[in-house]
Every structure is written in structure tokens, then in C-alpha cells.
Amino acid sequence: MRSRFTLGLTALSAALLLWPALVMAEGEAPTLDSGNTAWMLTSTALVLFMTIPGLSLFYAGLVRAKNVLSVLMQCFAITSIMTILWTAYGYSMAFGDGGAMNAYIGGLDKAFFNGVTVASLSGTIPETVFAIFQMTFVIITPALIIGAFAERMKFSAMLIFMVLWATLVYAPVCHWAWGGGWMGKMGVLDFAGGTVVHINAGIAGLVAALVLGRRKGFPTSHMPPHSLPLTVTGAGMLWVGWFGFNAGSELAADGTAGMAMAVTQIATATAAVTWMLIEWMKHGKPSALGIVTGAVAGLVAITPASGYVGPIGALAIGGAAGFICFFGATSLKRAAGYDDSLDAFGVHGIGGIIGALLTGVFASPALGGAGFKENMDMASQVGVQIISIGATIAYCAIVTFILLKIIDVIVGLRVNDEEETMGLDIALHDERGYNY
Amino acid sequence: MRSRFTLGLTALSAALLLWPALVMAEGEAPTLDSGNTAWMLTSTALVLFMTIPGLSLFYAGLVRAKNVLSVLMQCFAITSIMTILWTAYGYSMAFGDGGAMNAYIGGLDKAFFNGVTVASLSGTIPETVFAIFQMTFVIITPALIIGAFAERMKFSAMLIFMVLWATLVYAPVCHWAWGGGWMGKMGVLDFAGGTVVHINAGIAGLVAALVLGRRKGFPTSHMPPHSLPLTVTGAGMLWVGWFGFNAGSELAADGTAGMAMAVTQIATATAAVTWMLIEWMKHGKPSALGIVTGAVAGLVAITPASGYVGPIGALAIGGAAGFICFFGATSLKRAAGYDDSLDAFGVHGIGGIIGALLTGVFASPALGGAGFKENMDMASQVGVQIISIGATIAYCAIVTFILLKIIDVIVGLRVNDEEETMGLDIALHDERGYNY
Amino acid sequence: MRSRFTLGLTALSAALLLWPALVMAEGEAPTLDSGNTAWMLTSTALVLFMTIPGLSLFYAGLVRAKNVLSVLMQCFAITSIMTILWTAYGYSMAFGDGGAMNAYIGGLDKAFFNGVTVASLSGTIPETVFAIFQMTFVIITPALIIGAFAERMKFSAMLIFMVLWATLVYAPVCHWAWGGGWMGKMGVLDFAGGTVVHINAGIAGLVAALVLGRRKGFPTSHMPPHSLPLTVTGAGMLWVGWFGFNAGSELAADGTAGMAMAVTQIATATAAVTWMLIEWMKHGKPSALGIVTGAVAGLVAITPASGYVGPIGALAIGGAAGFICFFGATSLKRAAGYDDSLDAFGVHGIGGIIGALLTGVFASPALGGAGFKENMDMASQVGVQIISIGATIAYCAIVTFILLKIIDVIVGLRVNDEEETMGLDIALHDERGYNY
Amino acid sequence: MKWVIAIIKPFKLDDVREAMTSAGISGITVSEVRGFGRQKGHTELYRGAEYQVDFLPKLKIEVAVSDNLLDQVLEAIQKGAQTGKIGDGKIFVLDLEQAMRIRTGETGEKTL
Amino acid sequence: MKWVIAIIKPFKLDDVREAMTSAGISGITVSEVRGFGRQKGHTELYRGAEYQVDFLPKLKIEVAVSDNLLDQVLEAIQKGAQTGKIGDGKIFVLDLEQAMRIRTGETGEKTL
Amino acid sequence: MKWVIAIIKPFKLDDVREAMTSAGISGITVSEVRGFGRQKGHTELYRGAEYQVDFLPKLKIEVAVSDNLLDQVLEAIQKGAQTGKIGDGKIFVLDLEQAMRIRTGETGEKTL
Ligand SMILES: Nc1ncnc2c1ncn2[C@@H]1O[C@H](COP(=O)(O)OP(=O)(O)O)[C@@H](O)[C@H]1O
Ligand SMILES: Nc1ncnc2c1ncn2[C@@H]1O[C@H](COP(=O)(O)OP(=O)(O)O)[C@@H](O)[C@H]1O
Ligand SMILES: Nc1ncnc2c1ncn2[C@@H]1O[C@H](COP(=O)(O)OP(=O)(O)O)[C@@H](O)[C@H]1O
């Protein structure tokens, strides 16, 4: 996310620039821009829309009817709890000033939105808007993880885990990349959350799938999605909402936001078509679940790249994501034998890694990109990307593993066999999804 | 809803302010701001989205399968009819000049959008945008009421009632609070519709539930929601759309809009979590229907407060709404024995009262709020709030009661027993919701 | 779509205009306006939202359960393929410079978004945004067509047809009207796509319905919609998204955009109510499917008119659309005997023609409109509208027919009887919509 | 033993079950069916296409009873399901040769 | 009296009902079932997980008939349901001991 | 011939079908039913309104068998469906008088 001004200056003609340029030269702070604010208010709504109802429907359609509410409820509860957590201390830990520790974590100076008033600005938009835009990110990231352990985790254990995970994994990694921490300082390119959101969620999901173990009956008995229309609807909503995610990460309504939206569209479509074609060739028929999964893989992969690459980069990243995630969510999962129920790792983990890596390549101006960070070339940029990916994977995997093990001892992670057979909706929530 | 300028001035640095300040000093009218207009166009779309599909899905999921279309149809028909009514005379009655009667009702000078041209402004946005933004409010308010009499009211009677109610209740109360009437003059704080929308709808719902009587079989036979996934989806859409409702009521993309969005998010999440925890403690399990109902209660309660309170106020109002509405929609309803089918009163009526009241408290700058109306302190502000709440309740209850009684005599309010058993979809609309 | 400046100038007071006016007087190009850009980013999201999930749900609910995924999949695949096509050459063919052939078709100078950079502007918004806003139009137009041949067309044939149709029909007609071609030069008024989108899609649908023939069992055996709640939800989404379609076509957040949104709302509501009342009178009961179909008819008809007419025009156009399309989708279809499964022609074809025609009438300032094209009166404007409608119908019908015949020979258009009986979901995609 | 099949109106299920329980029945099986009979159906109308629906939603109750309970059970079902209006449904009795409880493998009347 | 159970292909319902009505039947009960038999099912595939579905959607028709109508009814069902392709289904006949109309309490053949 | 009706727990379907196939059965018909019996149901709670659900989802398997296969089939179903916990279900056997294959019109044991 970079200042609107850098870009704005390029785009504006000299005459019109004269006056604000003079003002800026005298060291004035940026002022509120109603257009940028309008777009960021909208983007915040769009990213919230990604989680509820978007992602929650996408996931809900994929589980069996007896677990449909458990998934919807998890997404809704995460949305609510993360809002409070972010208000209380998350925003401050991620974007506050960490003093001596600032390379690793922010401070508590902004706890309970302390000092964030109606008049506070963050660049050209109100700081409240920046804070809640970022809030929608800390909402969707844990929600993505639930895809990995759907249909078997206790609701209570899930809540405890998510609170700890957001505090100990999300907030620090977010600070590293965007809040002034070491990763950003090192020059990582992560426009909208390749490391912070998707790799983080994907790895946490993989660890959770391994620690919790497989669902009863997996993989011998078949567990078809109970309602693919819900899933396809959710996928459409994710696609639309993702415009806020990626183009919103510019924090302004300008040329970069426009390009971010364009490459998001192109990469997503390319990944969807790629997945469809591979499936058509491999299995003889293209499926609705296939094409929407491909689209999500494309959305994931373009996320870190969206403000940095051009149309050509989008085609390449989309194609790669469709191709590699296809094997991640099918062959790899079957070969390794873990039960990543809804492919949180196969799509978000793998897609995020592909995207973060290729951002280092297609940011190249020669390939239509916006350029590398200062004093970097493709090699050094890719190096920085790899370090960032590696650090995120390692840190996230270790902390997630420890957290899950501790929670397992204290409250237990899984429902018992009878509850799993009966379905989580009745077992944990005393309600049924459908009464036709 | 206050002028962008008041706030803008605070936020802008002196240097930049100089020029527009001079201009304004010369008494120039405000000019169109594309950023504010962009946000208000978006907000209008968001608030329409709250009714169709948002609220209509929320309610549709809660009824039995044989009545699903009746609810969807009522919401859709209300959307259409209110649009015509607002165009023809509603907007003029609410926001036109009432001359000598202006304290109570507007005039007909703007009937059929007379004088509202492409060039008309309302503050910094086109007047067309203001008029249709307000139109989305007169759409959702009657739609909220149907929750109280779902599954038993005649479609024809419903239409007649809504037209009369919007004319004789909504338009005047809207004028009182926002159109230059006595309530606004008295200094009520109602940012986005605590009295106008929610108390109004909730009270009308309660009266309707009492006049129509209970559904056949209530409360002995069980009437479980036929599709909670629809309800949870609708709740998510309401949450997202509500950003337009509350942050849009600022009529600008500025710091107040940002804060309104932030407190909306915080109060909603707090109410949702509060409801979930109470249910967990009282019944042993938290439910999906519970958490989403809590969220709606939070959205309702923060509505009048959204432009006036800060994060602390939001936490308090959300907590109070979750707590009190829980008992309103469960214990109170059972104790009193009325059949408010989908809890229009329990959630909107009670939540609206809580919010309108607490706005008078948490607007206090000492509690992080934006301050009371001129020359008011907390006591006098709360006094004004109470008078406004009381007047709305009394006026709405009386007129609603009279209207329903008259309509009952003329066309009859309820379907007959056989139609109720068969379901309204077949009985009134000759169609069935599902043909699997 | 006209420049924000024309209108802005009218609306702005002299003092504030002075400075920018001077600048413009010196011949400066328009510069990026963040407010307009914010609105266009939003509009792009809204129009994508119309197709996925909006239209896809609208159509999906109308088919039988065994074909639900086929429809969702077609919409999703079209979304993806059209994105790639538009990026590769569609945008260039429609909006590029066609040199000597420019009256009929654009060139390939902008293929693969060549020259469309972060800094490129289209008026006051980034060109990327203009290009993807237009992309969402080339997505929805083919998606509309599938309503005509739902439940029987091969997926492979559908894909081939759509690629060729978008290339040979959509791109040229789009260029004619909006890209600098003969129709625009002649002075056609088509604000958001009466000819380009709706007549085009409706006629292609009619031809497809005739070439493919009826579904097995039509019209003797009954094929009730499998889930009207999906359809009503989709209709609500279409309505909301259409604000981006129509008000977005102004390419700015200004008074014309506001009026476009207002007339969209009014015409849609009027058409919905009109349809409801006719059905009530003719069949004794109003239906949910009826009212939402009426709304879509209204949305279609106001599309070409939205930037040119006022509230009175909207009431008239909405009423006409509701009335005439009612007979188009019921009596006409039954009389003629073709199987336009989901009424792509009955609603979009007929509604588009009504709207395009009446635009020429209600653009009249005497009727509250924005005025005719330069040097035109109502007669000449209606003449131009008729020529444009006629040319679109003729060109589209002929090319569509030829394309379908060729594809039928090469890969075959229809699934076989057994696949049709079994349902396209299993037959073509190896999946089932629902597993309750 | 007898195998009793009753077709009833859906909203009468609770009444019938209670009546049967009072008659000493401890297990029944219910399924959703569509019935065609003297009771008139309704018309459905979708975009002008009319459709006469003759099949109405009914519930089918199946219960295995010992011979000596049969009469009481028939009476219980009839009482519970009756509204006196057309479409109340039918009760059918077939002979049941054998019954087995899966859990224990026991057979005969004691399994009912 | 006889209790006739027919398993048929879903899209044949209208034909069968018409044939039965012509044969003098005034009431039938239909339910949705899944059938496993000689007719091959299909494959479903979700993200690479293949699943062989052997159960096909069928309709079960149940009808009580008087002994003298039995043959005509069997013929009517067979004619109405036949496509000649595998999977057309089966008809089963059981003995029916008693029938009662709930509304009136009458029993015997006249209730059918 | 016999008409065998088994009420089982839904997740046991695959086991039962396999056991029956091994016992020589080539066709069965399955439907979704709700069972009321000794097995306790559960509570549902919607906005404070409690509801005791006594009906549990079960599957009903219907199969026509020749007399000589009956015992093996009963054994197969019992083995396949048994979990040893309450609610495993029941098997009922009725006499089947006649069977016909719709496609061919053949009747008797060979149609099963
Ligand atoms: N001969 C029959 N065989 C099987 N089911 C029947 C028969 N006759 C009626 N039914 C079932 O009983 C239901 C009620 O029958 P109907 O003739 O409508 O009213 P009534 O029971 O009052 O005579 C029908 O909907 C059908 O499900
Ligand atoms: N022995 C049986 N008992 C119960 N139902 C059977 C039996 N055999 C077949 N069916 C039912 O009849 C349907 C059709 O049988 P199938 O063997 O596929 O074809 P066909 O009827 O042409 O021989 C099956 O799907 C199943 O529902
Ligand atoms: N007398 C009966 N008639 C018909 N169905 C029965 C009868 N008794 C039990 N059932 C069916 O069998 C199922 C299992 O019975 P239940 O008493 O719960 O356990 P168990 O089979 O272990 O004794 C019930 O849910 C019901 O569907």
C-alpha cells in the first residue's frame, strides 16, 4: 500500500499540480480526500462482504447438510470476536508504535482505538477507515482457516484458538509486513496480503488438519458437498468482494487502484479457465466446483501482486495458480493423506506462496510491472520474497502447532464420534440447517 | 446528518483551508463534491441491498417452507410500492416545506420530484441522490414490520396497510426528526433512524401482532425456521448494507462517516458476542440464530448513535442491545404471549429504544462522543431523547392501531384457517418455493 | 456517457469555478478525479455482482434441480472467458481505433491492454477502470443469452458460441454505439446498453431458442422453477447491481449519475408493480416470480434511457415495460411456440426495444429529459433510435444464426435425450447440485 | 403381527403419535409422501404457464403391531388423524410374518 | 384386496397416473426413493475425489386395489412406466387385509 | 417370495448394501424416513423456543427376495446394520404374492 501522492503526481498535469505541490513542499501533512475516503469506505464494506456472507457460503455449501450451520456460525463468530479483539488491542499491536521492539511487534498506544478520533487521518483517509479496513483483514484470515478443520472441531476450542492465533500470529506478521516491521523494511512486496493473509491462513490450516486428524470415514466414505449452489454463490461474492481487498489496499481511488482491480479480474479469470481445462482434460468433464475453486486460487495468488504487476503478469500468475493449486487440492492432498476438508491449504497456502513468489518476478517493469523496491533487481526482490514466505511459514507453523496442542490438553479440540456422526449443528448448536 | 463542512474544517490544515474558507466566507453555496457523491451513490445501493435481498432472506429463512415466497414477495412489493409513493408525494411530505404546518409535516411542493433536476444539490451531493438515499429508508422500514405478522396476513391487506402507514406514520415522523420538524428543532440526536426507522417499525409490528392475533398452533406446535442458512446469509448482508445506512447518513465521505462505520462494526460485533454468551450460559449451547439475532440488535441500537459516539460508546451500546434484546425476543415475548413471529418488536423496537436513549448518554465528549446539541448537557439531551421516543411510540401505536382496525373491516387482515394450514405461497400466490 | 465537466460546470458557482475554468481554458486534458474514480471502481464491482452471483442465481432458481449447476457454471465460465477475451482483443476491437474501418470496428492497437498503464486516463478516471467497467458489460451480455437455451445446450458448444458471438456480434455493436462507430456518430441515445446489451442478448436468445428447439416435454409437461427463493434473491441482486450499470455509465459521480440512479429505481418499481397488477387481474393472484420478472423488465427498459430521462419518463418507461413484457413472456411465447426457457427474449429483447424506442421520446426536455442529441427533435431522434434497433436486430440475428448452424455441424449444439432426462449437472459436469 | 400403513395430513402427526403412544406403541416410522385422491389439489402458475397439481403433501406412518393391539392402534390413528374433511387419509393393514431387532437379533412380537 | 408397490422412473409419473386413472383407480400415494439395480449409476467428482453413485432417483407408487381390479392396474402401470430400457422398475403385489377411510371410519373395498 | 423392510441408521447404508450384494441381492430400494422409538432424540432451540425432536433420520430399505434367499438376506442386513447401540433399527418380513419387471412384463422370482 503506497501513498496516493507518489502515483498521483505522475498522473497529474503540471499546471494542476503546481498549487498542491507547493503546499506539500512546505511540508504540509496530506489532507482528507473525499474520493479516496469514498472508495475506502466501500472497500471496507466489500471485504466484510467477502467473509459474511461470501466465504461463509462458499464453505457452507461444501460441508454435509448436518454441519452447515457450524460453518456459518464459525465465520459469524469470528467476524464478531475479531472486531472486538482488533478494537481492544489488535490494531495497536499491528500498526502501533512498538518502540524498541518495533521490528517485531507494535505497542499498545492505540489500544481501544485510543487517539483515533473523527479528525485523525491516515494518509488522505480518516484513520478510523484505515483501522476498520484492516479489521476486515483480521476477520477473513482466521475464517479462511476453518476450511481445514471443518466438520469436526469443537466450537469452544475454535474460538480460543482463533483469539490466540490472531494475537500471536496474525498481529505480528501483519506488523512485520505492513506495520513498520522487519519484513516491510527489508523491502517485501505484499500488496494485499500474500504472506499476512493467505500463506498464514493456509499454513495454519495445514497444521490444524494434521493435529486434529481426519474426519470419521475420510477418505473411504464419500462426503459430497451438500449444496454447490451455495458454494458457487459464495465464490461469486468472494470475487466481487476481492476488488475491495486488492484495489482497496491502495488506500486511494487512483490509477494503481484501477490497475489492481484490472489484474485481479484477469488473474482470477485465467486461473478459473486453467483449472477448468485441466479438469476437462484429466477427468473428461469440467465441473462447477472446479471452476470456482480455480477462481479462488487466482484471487489468492494475485493478492500480493495486485498493485505491482500489469496485465501480462496477471495472466501468468493466474495461469500458474490454476495449474499448481489444481494439483495441490487434488493429487497432493490424496498422496499426503491429510484431511484439509475444504482445501484451505491447497488453495490459500499454495496459492499464496505462488503469488508472493511471482510478485518478485512480474513487478519487473520489463514485464509490465510497477517496479521493484528501491535498489532492488529481480534476483534480490525474489530473494526478499522467499525470505518473507519462509519466515511466515516457519513462524506460523510453529506457533499454530503449540497453540493447538495446548488447547487440546485444556478443552479438547475435537467433538466425540457420536457428535461427529450426528452432525455439529445438532450436537453443538441445538439447531438444524433445514426443515423442509 | 450534518454538513460536511463543519467537520471538514476541523480536519483540514490551515493552509489548505485558506482558499475555500475565504470563498465560504463570502457566502457561497456548497458545490458538488464527487467524493461525497460517490459514497452516497454507493450508500444508496447498500441500503437497498439491505432490503432486497438482505432482510428478505433473513426473514424468509425464519418462516416455514410453505410461506417462504410470501415473505420474499412482501419485501419485494414493498420495495416497489414505496418507491412510487416516495416519488409521488412521500419525499415532499417528509422533506418539502410544510409552511405553517412545517413543525408537523412537509408540503407537496416536491411531489413527483418536482424541481429536483440534474443540477439540484442537497449540500455537496445531487438532490436526486439525497432523495433516493432517503427512499431506501422508507423501503426498509415497512419491510421490517412484516416480521411481526408473517405467515398469516393477507397480501392485499398488507399492501393497503403499508401505503397508509408510510403516508400517515413514516412520512410525518421522518419530517419531525430530519425534515425540519419539531423533533429535530428540539435537538433530538437521531443519526440514521432510531426513532424514524426502528422504533417506528418495532411498535407498528407489536401493534400488528396484537391486532392480528397468533398464528394457528402458536405457541404449542413448533415452527422451526425452514432454512437457517438463508437467515444467516441475510444477516451478513444486513451487516454489510448497514454501513451504507449509518455511514451514509453523514451524506459525505469524511471523518464522521468513517467513525460511524467503525462504531457500527464495533457495536454489532459486541451485541452478537453478548447474545452468544448469554445463550451459552442460559441454554448450554450457542446457536447460529442467536448470534445473528444479536448482531441485528446491535445494528439497530447503534443506528441513532452512529455519527455521535466513539468506540467506547459503541462497546457499551452493543453490549446493552445484545443483553436486553435477548430477553425481549425470548422471555418477554413468551411471558406476554403475543406472536411477534420473527421478532420485529423484540429486536427493532427494543433495540431502537435502547439506542435512542443511550445516544443521549454516549454522545458526551467525556465518553468519546461528538458532543450534545448546542446548549445541552447529558440530562437535557437524554430528556429530549425520551420525549422523542415517547412521541414516536405513542403516535405510531395509535395510528397503526386505527389503520389496522379499519382495514380489517374493509378487506380483512388474515387469511382463513385453511389457507394458513396450506401455506400462503400456494394460497395467495399460486406458487411453491421449492420443487426439488 | 458524458464528461463530468460539462455538468460540473453548470452546477458549480462562478467563484469556485474560476481557477479550474482558467486551467481548462488553456486546453489542459482532464485530470484524474478521485471521486469519479471511486464511483467507477464501485460500479465495476456492482456490475460484476450482477452476473455472479446475481443473474446466475436468478436463472439457477428457474431451472429444474437437475440442471442448477449447469446454469451457474455457464455464467461463471462466461465471466472468466470473456475477461480473457476482452483483455486479449475485445476491448481493442470495441474501443480501439479502427482507422479507415472505424465506423464499423475498432483496431488491435490496444490488444492485451497495450498502452493501458497505471497513468492512462479515460476522461477523469483511469483507463484501466474504464476498460474493466466495460469488461463487466461483455460478461453479462452473453450470460443473459443462456436463459434462452437453458437445460439443453452442450457446455462445449455454448463456450464456442459465446467466444465467437462476443467477437463477431458484441464487439462490433459496442463499437458502433460507444466506441466511435456509425451508430454513435448518427446520434443514437443508448446510455447504458439498450441496443448493445439487451436487444443484442434478447435477439441472440430468440434465435438460439429457435435453432436448438424445445426442451423434451415442453410445453406439455410442467417444469416448475426448482427454487424461487434463489430467483428472488438473484432479482434483488440484479436490481442493486444495476445501479452500477446505469449510474456507472455516466463515468462520474455527478448529477447525471444521481438522476440515472433515481430513474432506474423508479422505472424498475413501476414495472414491477405493473406486472403484479396485470397478473392479479388476469389470473386472480399476484406471484413472486411475476413481480421480480416485472422488475427485471423495468431495469432493462430504463437502461438506454437512464442518463437522458427524468422521473416522469421513468414512470412511463417502467409502466410500458411491465405491461408489454408481461405479454411477451406469457402470451406471445405460448402463441409462437418457441421455448425461450427463462425468457431471455421476452424480457431482455422486448424490454430493450421498448426502452431504446422510448428513450427517443422521453429524452425530450418538455418531458423532463436531458434533451436530444444536437440538432435533433423528437421525430428525428426516434428515427435514429429505430434505425439503431433495426440494425442491431438484423445484424445480431443473422450472425447468431450462422454461428449456431456452423457449431451444430462441428460439435453439435444439444445434449442427447438421455443426458437431457438425466439432467445436465450429472451428464456434463459429474456433480449434483444438492445432497441433502 | 400386522403391518399398518396410514396416510395422514402432515399437521396431524403430533396428534397421531400421541394417540398411538397412549395405545401402547413404542416405535413408528414416518415418511413424506405425495397423495392423489378425492381431495382437490391446487393450481400453480409460473409466468403464465398454468399447472394443476393433484398431488398433495401427506405423511405415511408405518408401524408393526402385535395382533392384539391392532384394534386399539387403528382407533388411535383414526382419532388422531381425523378432521372430518376430505383428504384425511386411509389406513391399510397387511399381515406381518416376522420382525427382528437389528441390535440384538431377537425376533417376534417382543421386538416391536 | 391387494397392496401394489411400483418402482418407476420419475419422469413417467404422469403417464402412469393417467393409465391408472383410466383403469378406475381414484387414489394413489407416491414417494421419492433411490433405487439400486441393474441400471448403471453415474460418477460424481468433487475436487478430484471420485464417487460412484449406484443409487438412482426413482418414484415409488403405492396403491390399494380390489382383487378384481388388480390385473388392469398392473397392466396400466406397466404400460405407463415402460420405456423398454433397463431401469424401468418393478411392480410388487402384497395381500392387503384391511383398509379404512379415516374421515368416515368405513372399512373394506369401498374405501379405496 | 418375501418383501423385506429394514429400518437402519443412515450411515450404515454402504455396509448393508455390500452385505446384501454378497448375499446375492441385485436390486434394492431405499427411502429416507424418520423414526420414533427407544432411541432418544435431541432438543432444538430457536430464540428461546425449545423443541424436543423425537424423530430421528433413518433409512428404509425395501427388497423383494425369493424364499430361499430370505435367511441369508436377513443375516446380511443385520450384520451390516448393527452397531450394538440402541436405535439400530428393525427388519420386517411380509409375504410377497407377485413381482413383475416393467421393462419386459415377466413375472415371478426371476424378476428379482
Ligand atoms: N387406493 C389407494 N391406495 C393408496 N393410497 C390411497 C388410496 N386412496 C387414497 N390414498 C391416499 O389417501 C389420501 C387421501 O385420500 P382422499 O381420497 O384425498 O381423501 P379421503 O381419505 O378423505 O377419502 C390420498 O392423498 C392418497 O395419498
Ligand atoms: N429385488 C428388489 N427389491 C426391491 N426393489 C428392487 C428390486 N430389484 C429392483 N428394484 C428396484 O427397481 C429398480 C429398477 O431395477 P433395475 O434392475 O435397475 O432395472 P429393471 O427394472 O429394468 O430390471 C431399482 O432401481 C430398484 O429401485
Ligand atoms: N413397531 C415399529 N413399527 C415400525 N417401525 C418401528 C417400530 N419400532 C421401531 N421402529 C423403527 O425402528 C427404529 C429404531 O427403533 P428403536 O426403538 O429406536 O431402537 P432399536 O431398534 O435398537 O430397538 C425407529 O426409529 C423406528 O423407525
Image (spheres, coloured by chain):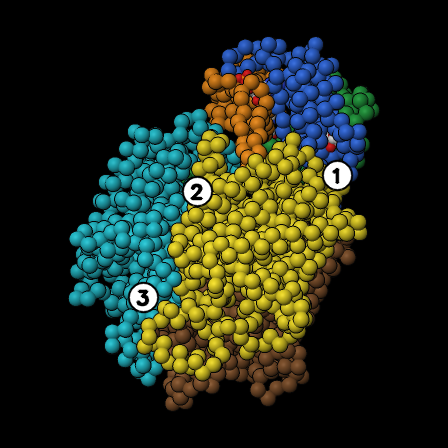
Chain colours: A cyan, B yellow, C brown, D blue, E green, F orange
Q: Amino acid at mark 3?
A: Gly
Q: Residue A187 appears in which quarter of the rendering?
A: bottom left
Classify residue A337 by image quadrant. Answer: top left
Q: Position of residue D94 (x, y in %)?
A: 70, 18
Q: Secondary structure at mark 3?
A: loop
Left or right of A89 in this view: F109: right
Q: Foreground residue, C401 or D81?
A: D81
Determine whether A70 is above or below B114 in the image: above
Q: Are marks 1 and 2 in contact (CB under 8 Å)?
A: no
Q: Can you say which quadrant of the picture contains the C terminus of chain B?
A: top right
Ligand 3's image quarter is top right
Q: What residue sits right under mark 3 in the picture?
A: A123
User: Residue at coordinates 39% horizontally, 71% vertically from top-left?
Assistant: B9
Q: Which residue is mark 2?
A: B273
Residue at left offset 50%, top offset 64%: B1
Question: Disc 1 designates what residue?
Answer: B417
Q: Which secondary structure, mark 2?
A: helix
Q: Using the rendered image of the protein, determine whether residue D34 is visible from the camera's viewpoint.
A: no
Determine whether the beta carbon of the residue marked 2 sits less than 8 angstroms from the nearest atom of ligand 3.
no
Chain that bears disc 3: A
Which chain hosts label 2? B
Whole-angstrom CA distance, mark 2 to mark 3, is 33 Å
**In the rendered image, is residue C177 in sight?**
yes
Discs 1/2, front: 2
* Front-most of residues A190 and A33: A33
**Residue name at image x 47 percent, y 86 percent:** C14
Kindly identify the amino acid type of the residue bearing the numbered disc 1.
Asp
Judge the density around disc 3: few (<14), some (14-19), many (≥20) Cα neighbours within 10 Å: many
Q: Position of residue B13 (x, y in %)?
A: 33, 72
Which amino acid is tagged 2? Val
Q: In the displayed structure, would residue A399 be above or below residue D22? A: below
